[in-house]
Image (cartoon, coloured by chain):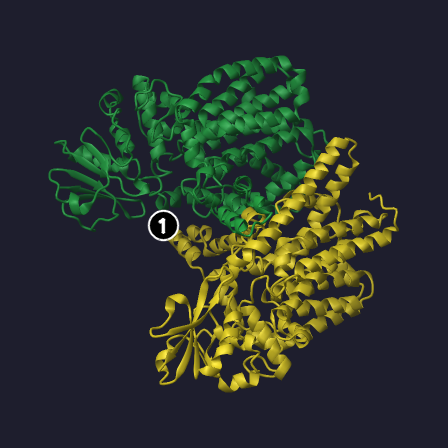
Chain colours: A green, B yellow
Amino acid sequence: MNFFKKHKLIILILALAGFLRVFRITQVPPSLNWDEASLGYNAYSILKTGKDEFGNFLPINLRSFEDYKPALYAYISIPSIALLDLNAFSVRLPSALFGTLTVLLIYLITKEILKPLSSQKSLNSQNPKTLSLISAFLLTISPWHLQFSRAAFEANLGLFWFCLASWLLLVFLENKNYKPLVLSGLSYLLAMYGYHSLRLIVPIFLILVFLVFKKKFIKNWKPLLVSLLISGFLSIPLIWGFFNNGGQARFSSVGFISQQNLLNKSIQYIQADLKRSSLLIWIHNRRFVYLKTFLNNYLSHFNPNFLFINGDLSPRHHISSHGMLYLFQLPLVLWGAFCLAKIPKKSYFLWLWLIASPLASALTIATPHAIRANLMVIPLTILSAIGLWRSYIHLRSKKILLAASGLLLAFFITRYLLQYHLIYPKNTAHDWQYGFSKVVDYLKNHNQENLPVVVSFSDHTFDQPHIFFMFYLKVDPQEYQEKWAHQPFNRFYRSFDNYQFREVIWEKDQNLKDVYIVTNTWGMPSNPRGLVNEISFPNGEVAFKIIRL
Amino acid sequence: MVNFKLNKKLTNKLLIFLVVFFAAFLRLYRLGSLPPSLYWDEVSLGYNAFSILKTGHGEHGEKKFPLDRFIAFGDYKPPGYIYATVPSIAIFGLNEFSVRLPSALAGIGTIILTYFLAQEFFKSLSPQNSQVPKILGLISVFLLTISPWHIHMSRAAFEANLALFFNTLALLTFFKGIKKSGWWLILSSFSFMLAFYTFNANRIISLLLAVGLGIFYFKKIIKKPKFTLLAIFLALVMALPSFRFLTSTEGSLRFKEVSIFNNLEPLKRSNQQIFWLGNSWWARIVFNRRVAYSWHFLKHMFDHFNFDYLFFYGDRNPRFSTGQVGTFYLFSLPLLVYGGYLFFKSKNPHQGLIVFWLFASLLPSSLAKETPHALRTLSLIPLPFLISGLGAFEISKKILKTKKTILKYSILSVSVLTLFFSVTRFLHIYWAHWPQESASEWQYGYKQLVSKVSGLEKKYDRVVITKAWGRPYVNMLFHLKYPPQKYWQTRDAFRDVFGLWHVEGFDKYLFGLEKIQTLEAGHILVAAQPNEIPEKCSQVDSVKSMNGESIMNLCEISK
């Protein structure tokens, strides 16, 4: 009882965090997207057979759509799938759970970072516990963190492990014990197993931390060595996986260096300079272009429009016309950073975290990227907590201003939550590949005689339809692996049982007989022959036409 | 900090002279041909000034010595730049150099003013050592001298750049005014009004800044009530001539054309959201269109803080930047961050004003569609250089103090190399590559075309010129130095529903290839782009681009 009393505020915050992450989790976001479906089905497959859909035994990376997803999320969701069966809830639950635990971790991390600072004069009114509670609360309601805790994103799991590891590391820096350091090493390793970006960020981050706190590490070289040995040994499969199945493939498909147009301008300049034999030709060297692109990508993660106004390019990563954070966090982050900058040493940990977070994302295309750089949310939330606390101190005596600011904050938060729950599922259903579960339901009920079903694979948004059928039909993994897993991989034509996934060309396909055709509206007449059902998006637009010929 | 044995004052003067000399070189060297040629706004400013010089009327032969605006293309240009160009045209004749000279001189002037502004801003930094603000001023001014943004803006006839000079002068004289003689306040008010009459965005910026200064330094100006009132009175009197124009429909036309509030997207989105929530009262509050439009406005304002714009590619409009170098060099990022941190950490009395100045200068641009905008935000220019100057000063102080010699010299040499590389890269791209790339944006070729036409035209009855490059008439007038009175008599012009003027011809010139059909008989010289040459037109000559391609063909038709 005493425990609850002592910690009642953080328990309340965690309860709120859990509620905000689980409430209506199957309806918002409106449906499982293909990655979530793939993680779910692979977890199901591993649960039933010990192998993924392609028959790989206990894989480190899931081949999935040839994108080699880190498999950790699938393993972690096995218990919930075993208990609750394969459905949207059981696939998303682990993310919500670990997201809630991350809220606890930001509380512990803030406390640990600010503990030695509370004696400092400049922060005399900053109680580390209050600040930790504010951080935890801000993360609880943070759009960036809520978004990825409510769907099966590997990155969210990676964030949890990274936070756990960092907290343990901070504990080690304080008390210099074996245990937290070894556990920290293991958690960092799990973070790397959990998400691609972290495989790059973690080593760089740790090297930076080592350089900054090297005295403490060198003094305690024994636990460091033990921890390094254990983690080093356990990282062998990861390294092996990188070189053997597709770690590089993933990188070259999203890395900016393989972009075609990247060097066009400098080539054009070099040609012009060659003609007049200019001495300054070296200025257009491609290495400078790479450096410039990298730095531009990196810094784009600090663009105010990304953080506070519009978010990144993908509608799956945030509600429309909303930044990754609340707008009111802009002044708070700046002020928090300003206050923290005055305090040396231990706060470096937080700066290093912020600096390291966008590193992996900066190497890729489509920056800024909210998932690949999602580690940023922790330092930014802590900074805004400091800013919020400082503003409170300043406004304490001015009651009217305080009340007005409180109202403004409440308005922003309410607006966000309302838009997320009531508007977001309506206008982004398309981006979440909404409708497949209804299609499968319909076919289950109506296609009693097992006629062949042709499902259209047309434009990019209806990519990978097969995985939804495998997921919602709960296709037996054993059978699937034996019969279908070994067909040559072809994104544009796949099949299993009586299902075919390919482009539907209506002029030709309307002549088929005794077949179901499932297509989206693109390139289709509005009322084609044999139309038996239409599945609509929540905003009323038609998502799928089901045709029986 | 410096080991000069020379008299400190002399050293300072020598250094500032060198910086200004370098600035003048970067701004005046090849002024007439870099940017490659005059684009239509420059041409129009030049011809209007020429017309004032010769006749006292604007290009349209409207009322004498207009003070409120020049009609020009129907875009109603503010008069400041045009009057400023009159003396330079009187001296150097009507050409590229003379049109751009006021802007270049204003650029050099801004640099000198910034040096003195730095003294004002950083005096509080070390009251006992008067050397510190001077060194700081020198660093700031050096950074401004090599700035890609300021170099380019000073090299074309941009009204904004002249307005920037007046705006900076107004700020500087205000600070003089609150400390020394109150007459400076009168000069400040006068300069604000000159900025007001020079560039559209400055009509808002001048007003905001003047009010802002009044608020932030209320305690100081209240001590000089007579001068303050006189300054306000002067500003009001000077504003009078433009009052009628600004409240007329023509005056607001330009604003309406570029305003972000014309965009219906936020409204549509807001209505859709309210509709989905059943038109309930709370949905109307939470998803109010005013919130949506504020969001939209902030997006445009924050566009100016986009790192892509600031440090990597600059303004994407090829007339406003090279598109390959940032608005600032990348090395100024750490200087700005550190300088900003120091500035707000110190108890500098000007903190409030600096923030206000920044947002006041961003406001007009943020209300318009194309953001980020390097031209409309130009009035904030001294500010980032004062801040990065402070950062550079403190960092170099720290480096020079270090006792670790190897570290010291390696950091110093890396810094010097970075500086050298950045400036060389910009100047190389700006001098060697950008002119060819952007030539068509600057309507390169008109001058060559006009000189060819004037050589050939005696043999022909009429000359027909394509409109494909835009506004050929003003280029003809400019490059022929055509007498304005003669133009008014012979021109065939009309005003469209949007208030824009279209000139179809004057003298023996006709604009638009469709005019060929209307001509009955005679010998016609035609100027057309290679892809639009009319039938039965036999080639006479052609205008070449800088790369030697034919961009305009001259051919003849006999009817």
Residue B473 % position (x, y): 49, 76
Can you see residue A392? no
Q: Is residue B446 above or below residue A233?
A: below
Q: How many numbered badges does the structure rendering display?
A: 1
Badge 1 element? helix
Image quarter in which the N terminus of chain B is found: top right
In this view of the protein, can residue A215 be seen by the observer?
Answer: yes
Residue that carries the numbered disc 1 in the rendered image: B276
- Image spot of residue A19 (x, y percent): 44, 32
**Residue B307, placed above or below residue B516:** above
Q: Is residue A356 above or below residue A482?
A: below
Q: Quadrant of residue A59?
A: top left
| Front position in the image: A472 or A222 | A222
Q: Amino acid at mark 1?
A: Trp
Q: Residue at x 78, y 55 (%)?
A: B16
Label 1: few (<14), some (14–19) or many (≥20) C-alpha neighbours in 10 Å: some
